[in-house]
Image (cartoon, grey):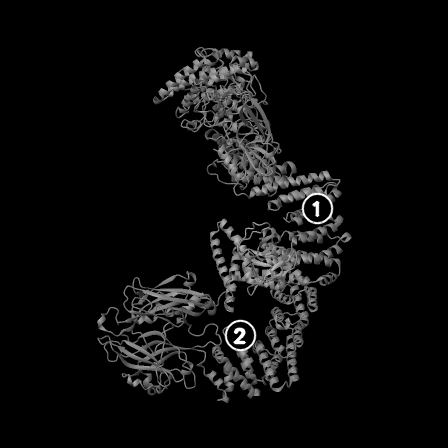
Amino acid sequence: MWIPTDHEKYGVVLVSFRGTVQHGLPLEIGDTVQILEKCEGWYRGYILKNPNVKGIFPSSYIHLKNAHVKNKGQFETVIPVEDSVITEMTSTLRDWGAMWKQLYVKNEGDLFHRLWHVMNEILDLRRQVLVGHLTHDRMRDVKQHITARLDWGNEQLGLDLVPRQEFSMVDPDEISVTELYKLMEHRHRKKDTPAVASTHHLFVHVKSLVSANLGEELEVFIHIYDGRENRPLSERFFVKLNKSGLPKSPEKTERQCTLFVDLGSSDLRKDVYIVVHVVRIGRMGAGEKKNLCSVPYRRPFGCAVVSIADLLTADSKDDHLLKVYACNTESEWHQIHENIIKKANSRYNLSGSNTGLAVALQLLHGDIEQLRREYMVLFTRGVSITRKLGFSDVIMPGEMRNDLYITLEKGEFEKGGKSVARNVEITVYVLDIDGQILKTHVAAGSGEPGGDEYHSLVLYHNNSPRWAEQLKLPIPVDMFRGSHVRFEFRHCSTKDKGEKKLFGYSFVPLMQEDGRTLPDGTHELIIYKCEENASLAECSRYLKLPFSKGNLPSNNQTLKGAKESFWITSFLCSTKLTQNGDMLDLLKWRAHPERINDSLSKLKEIDGSEIVKFLQDTLDTLFGILDESSQRYGLKVFDSLVHIINLLQDSKFQHFKPVMDTYIESHFAGALSYRDLIKVLKWYVDRIVDAEIQDHIQQVLKASEYIFKYIIQSRRLFSLATGGQNEEEFRVCIHELFMSIRFFLSQDNKSTSPVAQTQAVFLRTFPAVYGELLKIFAVREVAGFVRETLGSLPTAVHADCLEAVKLQCIAKTVESQLYINPESRCILLPVVLRVLQAHMQEQRDLVMCARIFTSMLSLIKKQENGTAEPVVSEEVELIVESLLGVLLRTILEISNRPQQSGPAMRLQFQDVTGEFVACLLALLRQMSDRHYQQLLQAFSGKDNLRDFLLQIFTVFRILIRPEMFSKDWTVMRLVTNNVIITTVLYLSDALRKNFLNDKFDYKVWDSYFYLSVIFINQPCLQLESFSPSKRKKILEKYGDMRVMMGCEIFSMWQNLGEHKLNFIPAMIGPFLEVTLVPQPDLRNVMIPIFHDMMDWEQRRSGNFKQVEAKLIDKLDSLMSEGKGDETYRELFNSILLKKIERETWRESGISLIATVTRLMERLLDYRDCMKLGEVDGKKIGCTVSLLNFYKTELNKEEMYIRYIHKLYDLHFKAQNYTEASYTLLLYDELLEWSDRPLREFLNYPMQSEWQRKEYLHLTIVQNFDRGKCWENGIILCRELADQYESYYDYRNLSKMRMMEASLYDKIMDQQRLEPEFFRVGFYGKKFPFFLRNKEFVCRGHDYERLEAFQQRMLNEFPHAIAMQHVNQPDQTIYQADAQYLQIYAVTPIPESQDVLQRDGVPDNIKSFYKFNHILRFRYDRPFHKGTKDKENEFKSLWVERTTLTLVQSLPGISRWFEVDKRELVEVSPLENAIEVIENKNLQLRTLITQCQSRQMQNINPLTMCLNGVIDAAVNGGLARYQEAFFAKDYILNHPEDGEKIGRLRELMFEQAHILEYGLAVHEKFVPQDMRPLHKKLVDQFHLMKSSLGIQEFPAYVRASPVHFTNGSPRTCRNSVPNIISPDGGRGVARRSYPAVNRYSSSSLSSQASNEVSNITGQSESSDEVFNMQPSPSTSSLSSNHSASPNVTSSAPSSARGSPQMAEKHKHSRENACLSPRDRPVSAIFPNPMDPAQRAPPHQIGDATLPRSDPNLSAPDKVRHTPSSWSLDSVKEGAPSFSDSFGKTLCPPVPPRPLYSGSSAKNMRSQSPVSASRSPQKTMVPPFTPSPTECQSTSLVSNSPVLSGSYSSGISSLSRCSVSEASGTELPAGDHSSFPLPQPTTLPNSVSSSSDEPIRRENKTPPPYSVYERNNPRRPVPLPHSLSIPPQADPPALPPKPHQLRTGSMKLDGTSDPRVPRPRPLPRKVSQL
């Protein structure tokens, strides 16, 4: 049975549990679980990190831990009983764990590894804490280390700052908000600004001396030297090195390492140096032989110097190699370091090229104790301490030091009978009072232990040596008296013996008879001659002699005149001994009572360091004198005491204050002193007002704290001694003293007056007295003293400085012990509040006011049950009454104040804001219901209440600002929000009661709603973005405050009634923002408000257009910010639809909701797409969808234009320049050529509409240029040119014409790639809304084939499944919860047949019209209908042709557009066969033509094509068609196909004739090694002819099969290519076959299955649906090279051998039936000089061959495999137009030579009739089948002179499509991108892009403009060479389907008068 657990509540998982049992809960090691129930070895509970999933688990797997249980029962929570640091560590490490893995994913390796180390370190420290074996101090250090690491990690990961006290996390509810703010601020500051260390230490480690010529031991001395004052700052550090230059005692690190301690910040200057002196120990001369002298001498070696400032910048851990210099002469040795510093190069040189001292130098900062903790290794292994000379900047009491430093300066010696100067060595000894040598008391420096004696340097042959060697004599204080130092002088011989001969000595006693020590300074000592050591044994003999020449009596001239002298400098650093006689006289006052007055007077002149040395003795002396002679010396003693007290205020001696405190508590014995002290103090205070000089009085008042300490302690001692006598007298004295103080404080003086300054001095020290008074007086009594004293200050103080001091005094009062007591607080509070209120109202001293306020509020705390004590409640009431209003005003004032310049000021005001905000929050949190009621009742009128509410709501809005607190102060923000929502709940009642109905006030309500909305939208309340643990903590502590505020908004809204109309539509946006917060409860509460708004708006105006407009406007901006989701869309829809069910306006409501919902769908899709990294089709497609929605459904022009520019940016980034142009045209089209001013918008400046449209035109032209869409650019150039011309701006007109010309050149000279088109179906519910269950046609990238496109689409939609068939999917696929992609290639059907059908138009021009402005596409699928004949599959092979019509033509504003309409037709086997042969014939013609015109590099493609066709025919290819369709059965069964059968027969004969002619051409060009193949082809061809039963060709095919009027196989379909009329026109129009397949081609091989495969690109059973793209093979009728299914013929359907023929064309047929010899040569073979019959270049590779069937208008593509004979290899650039005149084809006859002379002359002589075509152009008629349509030749139509005179509308430019970057290159020298600055003058090249597009309405885009209708141009005179002979008769042929250009040219060459140019009318945006 399951029993609820009592104690087993919390545990940690020890072993992982899979949870395989029923109801089992899977557990991982380390999980923490909460246990609910237990049963026989099992527990039931849940993992704390996922409390929703409960289950059972074995109890043995759990380690139980102690825990507290809160809220026992269903909602109980468990808090583990363990150290709070451990708890924090555990939860923090869990949070870090997840984030740490993410760092790895994001590739932030550095932080990943650092965090890994810190986490391991924390785990290690956690282990130490848990074990519990640490000492208290060590535990403290470990916890400090842990919290430091936790804070570091939180900061690095952007987590919250944790407020802590004593390393434990603080519960914000348990401390005041002001305290919480202080903690946060302290931690923030600690993080931001590390404290600047005041003391510094230099660590030095001597490693070795590197030198080539060592061999002797060395001594290294290092000290710090002040280059400015030329004196050493520290004692010397001494290291001994062996002969190798390494330390002598490597095991004793303290002998190589030292710490130069107590360097002040002033010592880290550029002119402070580390100076190293190196001394060698050995022979006198460095190069002497070893056997000369065995006695070692100390001799100079070298010196090194480095500036200490260099260490601040260098890497502190680097070793330094210091260069060692030697002096040029030994006499300079004493100042070599100075010469190096001054860079006096002539006086020193390098001691060796590679001599250097290797040392480690490191500057350490901070207190020495702190360093001991931080650098434990340094101190544990041993390091010597090297002190400063003298005391450090701060002298610590208890510091024991007694060091005498003596420097051997110089000497003057006589030669002593020698011929050369002496080598003098000094030996130094210290001897005690008995004459015994003191052992180990002579030290050369720190590092090495002291010795018994010291030997100086020996300077060679120098009678005036200067050593400058410093010694340290650490002599104990008790041995100082009677001791002396003796200096013995010896001459060191350099002879063989090397003896040292004594020749004199000096001495100096250390203490004088009166107890003073040897004074600091330089002493000239007398040298006494002495040659025997024995004579020095008796010290008493010479100690009676004078030691210094300065001390000699004036009559002792003998010694004074002695030439020999020795100078030393002494310096004593002692905490016990003094050199000051006045100090000694004062201390010994009883010995000389008559000197007391002088001694007290001289005390002020004594150095402070001397006084603090003897502080206790001095104080005892003063109080001793006071006790004995108070009348006589009272005032002087008082002054001396004041002097000493003020001396301790100095920062150098401040640490001696505790010494004085200890003295007062423990050693002070002046029980009677208080009377004298009070009396003298009162005497001084009474004199203040009258005294002229206040300096001394101010000194007295400055010392008043300690004077009161002495007074109080003295009175206590007296009371103890006498049992409390004279108590009343003492009280009276104190009261009188305070009366005097109050009198002098009450004086109202100007700030400059001395009294005001004295008042300020007193106020600074007064708060320190409170604590002393409390030792004797009651709390209330002291509070009374303070209140009266502070209250005596004048209210209107003129002195600003006094005001500040007064405030400081109040601050110290509030922070004092006195104020903490509730009894005294109620007495002092009114005074404090009065001062505070006055200052805050005037906005003065706000920093101090904030400090006072903070201290006051931190003392007020509620009890556990939430109620306050009565005293506390009263205090809160007082504070609210006095300061709440002024506090709100202050916060508003500070927040609105402009930021001060300078970081310090900014910081100050920022801090003040934070402090005041914390005070406000603390005060509001303390307020109860009663306080709120009293506050609201206190307002006299509605206006005051209104102002208060507006103020507090405004302040709350300021508190919610993100910049109010630092980013990581989440704790503080949550507390703030909790206080705000509590206060708002109280105030909303006041709002309802006072400002509703007739008293309604819009401003207050608006402020309320605005506050509520921004409250809910705060980032710190969006719990969804937090980690689960953080979210759980917040919900447990505060709940979801957003829902609470949302409910309050709803409640308040419902109370408004008819006043709701005031907030419609203003509050729609804010409320919408609230509903977008992803909190279901909040959404459910808030969404119904929109129904309410619709209802009220309907009542007011009969519709809710305002609501709709506002909703739509706000939705876009909010959703683009990332707000809202699919759930919201569904919720919005369902809630509102339910709400409006019963409304009368239900229909319009449903419409609005549907519109908004659809907009949301698109916006969500748009946002999701925009999250993806790279620009892709999804982003563009989504933007197009949204853009169209705004235009068509919502008619929001501004949003529409914004999205136009977003789309433009996407295209531009993806280098889809053509699409970018079309997009920008949409905006361009909205503008007119007017001077209307336009405002600044997006990136456009303020400008006129004309200027913006001009700018857009230029940008669009530039992008069309980049996208190689030059034809469209020309149209815009012309429009701009018209504008320039109408304004007579010829400069820009010229540039525009040149630009237009350059675009024409590019059309003719540059190659354009022909794109592929793909149909893509998106099926399934998982696709975005704008794609779901729709099909699109997409324009591929350059060189992109089906496989690449398919892969790209699958990359864009990684979850999509590729469908393996091309059939339309069924409903299951449509409704599937997945993504299905169906992709196959489609073929474009060009709209513009006009250009494609025209003869002589170069391919460069035609290619544009084949692939631009395409609205329809086609796809063919072969299938068998009926029984399949295995012998001949062609009998039943049908083709299903699908035609797709798009919503807009490609290219357009997108690379893909949706399919608008599908049409399916079936093509019969016979029609299919006709198309296949037509295509192959066309391909053969093309190849033959190119071969003849020498456009092919080699003949291989023609060879392969011939081989394929002939080989297939021989092996039964064409025979299969004969067998299938020429059989009697077929003809009888299909009488309706008679025409088609005739056409097929005709095509077969035509093919045979083409092959024959092709073989003739092939023979001419075939290389020698291919001759056998050619012969084989000829033989096979004869076989083929015989198999077809062809002996002689019919007349209609005997004409040259390769003759085309335009010299190109791309003939127009409206004329028969091989039937040529004598007049050069084409004849024989045929009926068109609407169902004929012009796209598939099938091979006629014997394998029928291959044929099927060739037509479709796959076999029917093939799974590779994505190979539906036609095979790119070039041969059609070959069994080896299968044909492309999309290879199509350009032979026109209207010209296909029909048995019936129009009568008017019979003469053409007859002429065509003549033999070649009988026909006019100009008709059959092109005239070499005839420009109309010139063969322009034709590219075969990927060319789609033009069609002219008016039904289908589809291009025919010839595709080919990239094999060795691929036609891609023979592509050539198009030759220039002028070159191409004259190249012709002459079938059986060799080509004619080029004629010279005028082309017109040749035309007239060769072909007069053909020149008679009208040069006029007609519009393309509607696409209806015309069986009689025929195209005539027109010479003039090709004229380059005329080509510039056409123009086309840009309505076609509004077609669009979606895609990614096209690989077009930018034009040279133009790399700018949108937006450009507004062009003032038109540049030569096209301006860069902008981003707004236009639409046109015309569907068929001829290359030139429809503007021509409105803007007739000047007629262009016909050039002489193309002029038309008057006698020419036009043939009786129907005209070509071209519209006549009105007034474009006159036949007689004359010009029309110029018609004025009207302005074009503005165009409207066409369909989107």
Counting residues from the start of the chain, the first of labels 1 and 2 encountered is 2
Characterize the local packing of mark 2: few (<14), some (14-19) or many (20 or more) Cα atoms within 10 angstroms: some
Judging by the rendered image, the residue that carries numbered circle 1 is: 1088
Q: Position of residue 1933 (x, y in %)?
A: 54, 15
Decide which of 968, 784 is in the foreground and name it. 968
Instruction: Name the quarter where the C terminus is drawn.
Output: top right
Q: Does residue 841 appear left or right of residue 1755 in this picture? A: right
Q: Is residue 456 visible?
A: yes
Q: Which mark is residue 649?
A: 2
Is disc 1 placed on a helix, strand or loop? helix
Q: Does residue 1804 appear left or right of residue 417 in this picture? A: right
Q: Does residue 496 appear left or right of residue 1528 in this picture? A: left
Q: Residue extending furthest right?
A: 998
Q: Position of residue 974 (x, y in %)?
A: 62, 57
Q: Does residue 872 appear left or right of residue 1248 in this picture? A: right
Question: Real-space Cα distance between discs 1 and 2?
Answer: 71 Å
